[in-house]
Amino acid sequence: MVSKLSRRRFTKLAGAVGASSAFGLSACATMEPPKARVVVIGGGFGGATAAKYVRAIDPAIHVTLVEPGRTFVTCPFSNYVLAGFKTINDITHNYNALAGMHGARVVHDTASGIDPAKKAVTLAGGETLQYDKLIVAPGIDFRWGAIDGYTEAAAEIMPHAWRAGPQTLLLRRQLEAMADGGLVIMSVPANPFRCPPGPYERAAMIAHYLKGNKPRSKILILDAKDNFSKQPLFQDGWKAVYGDMIEWVPLSKDGKVTRAIPGEMTVVSEFGQNHKGAVVNVIPPQFAGAIARNAGLANQTGWCPVNQTTFESTIHKDIHVIGDACLAGAMPKSGFAANSQGKVAALSAVNAINGRPTAAPTYVNTCYSLIAPDYGISVTDVYRITDQGIAPTPNAGGISPRQADRAQRTGEARYAEGWYAAMSQDIWDA
Amino acid sequence: MAQNASPQLLTFSCAGCHGPGGHSPSTIPSLFGRTADSIAEILRAFRTDQRPATIMNRIAKGYSDAEIDAVARELATNWK
C-alpha cells in the first residue's frame, strides 16, 4: 500500500494549484458535484498516466478509468521473460494506487462505444459514462489476415507475443520445448508499429537463452523493411555477444512475409520463398485499437490524427487520443512516448476545463534495449513542435555511441532496470 | 529555437526515469532535495559534455538555457 507521503510527493510533482487541491483526496468521495468529469479509456502506459496526472494536477476533477483487465502486463521487459531472467509477475502491475490514494474511479469493463455528440461512453456491462473530456488510449490491435493465413487461431501456434501476457508465456514455453539446433523465425512488420526496437531486442534475448541452453540453434529475422531502430548498435552487439547466431533478412533481400502456414510451421516471403521454423514468432501489422477506429477517430492509415500540441483528436472535439493509437509525428510508438503524451494530454484537458491557456508542450522518449543482461543500449529524443509536426530537437538525443567502453554498456543495462522501476511508479505502482 | 516549454511539463518529463517527485526507486539517481543552482549547473555540464554520462548528455542538449533554469527552479521548489 502506498503512503500518504507519496501522495503528497506526487501532488508536489504535479505542482497542483488552486483551492481545490487543499481539500485532498477525492472529489468523488464527497457529496459535492465534481467540477468536471474526465473519462480515460485504457489503463496502459498512456491511459493510466493520464488518469493519474489529471487527478494530481486538479483533484476537483472526477476521473474514471475504463480498463477491462484487473492487472496490466507490460510489453517493455517482456523480452526478458522470454530470456528467462524476469518472470511475468515482475512485469505485472495493478490499479490499486490509482483507485486508492489518487482517487480515480477504476471500472473494469470494456468500452463498447463513444458518442462524441452526446459526450458519452457506453460500456459492455451496460453503464453509460458522461464526460467533459475523454482521453482514449487503446493501444494497438492486430491486422489479422494482413499476412495471409495469420489469424487469431494461428497466433496460438505461431505466437505474436506483441501484447504481453499469455502470448509471452506461450512463446517462452515453445523456446523451452525446442531441441538444440532448432531454427527460430521472427517476422517483423514495416513501420509504423508498436516498439520499433522491440523485435531486435527480442532476437538478442532469445539468443541469450539459446546460447546458454541450445547453442547450436539459430534465429532468422525476416523483416518487411530495410533499416530499423538502433540498427548499428544491435548489429554490433549481436555479433559481439552471439557471433553468427542471428541472421537478419531485410525487405530488399526478400525479407517480407506475406503468408503464414501454421500447420507446417512455415512462413512464405513476398517472392515465394518458404521458411520452416521450430518456433515461429509472427509480429503482424497493426492499427489503432478497435474502440478508436469504431468511434471514427482513425483516418485511412488506421491510426488517429491529433493536434500535436494538445493531443486532441482533429476529428472529434473534446476527445484526446494518446499512445500507440495516435499519429504523433516523429515520436515512436513506445511506452515512454505514451507516458509523455499522457502528461501533455492531462494538462491540456485540465487547462481547458479551468479556462487556462494551453501549456507549451515538450515531449521526450527514452528507450533502453538489452543485447545481454549486462549490455544495454538506448535511444532518446527531446521533441518539439515544428512546421513538420512533432520532430526531434536538432543536435540532441540520438542513440548510444557506437564506439564505447564496457562501462557505457553495463551502465545502460543498469539504467534500463532503473528506468523500468521509475516508469512503473510514475504510472501504476505509486 | 522553438518556444520554451512549460516548466510543469518539463518537470513531468523528468519523472519518467527519475521517479515521481524525483524519488528514484532503483538505479537512476534521485532528484529531490537539490537546489536550483546545483540542478542547473549539472544540466549545463551534461549539455557541454563536461560531466560524464551515459544518456543525460544527449538529453540535456535538447533544452534551452531558459528551460534549464525553469526546470531547475520548478524541481527545487516542488521536489523537496
Image (cartoon, coloured by chain):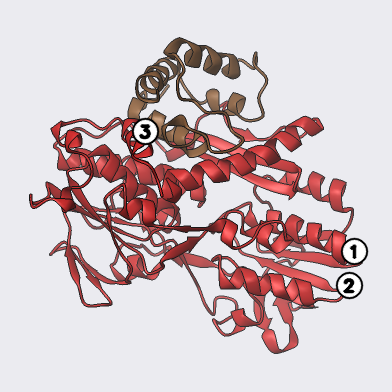
Chain colours: A red, B brown
Chain letter of disc 1? A
> Which residue is label 1 attached to?
A215
Mark linked to residue A180: 2
- Residue at the left extreme? A32
Secondary element at tag 2: loop
**Disc 3 marks which amino acid?**
Arg
Q: Give the answer, above or below, for where A139 lies relative to B68.
A: below
Q: Nearer the viewer, residue A384 or A60?
A: A60
Chain letter, disc 3 residue: A
Q: Amino acid at mark 2?
A: Asp
Chain of the residue displaying label 2? A
**Quarter of the C terminus of chain B within the rendering:** top left
Q: Amino acid at mark 1?
A: Pro
The image quadrant where one finds the N terminus of chain B is top left
Whether residues under marks 1 and 2 lie with C-beta atoms below 8 angstroms apart, the answer is: yes
Mark 1 and mark 2 lie on one chain; the one further toward the N terminus is 2
On residue A9, the disc is 3
Residue extending furthest toward the right: A216
Q: CA distance from mark 3 to mark 2?
A: 51 Å
Return the x and y of residue A55 as percentages of the image width and height.
27, 45
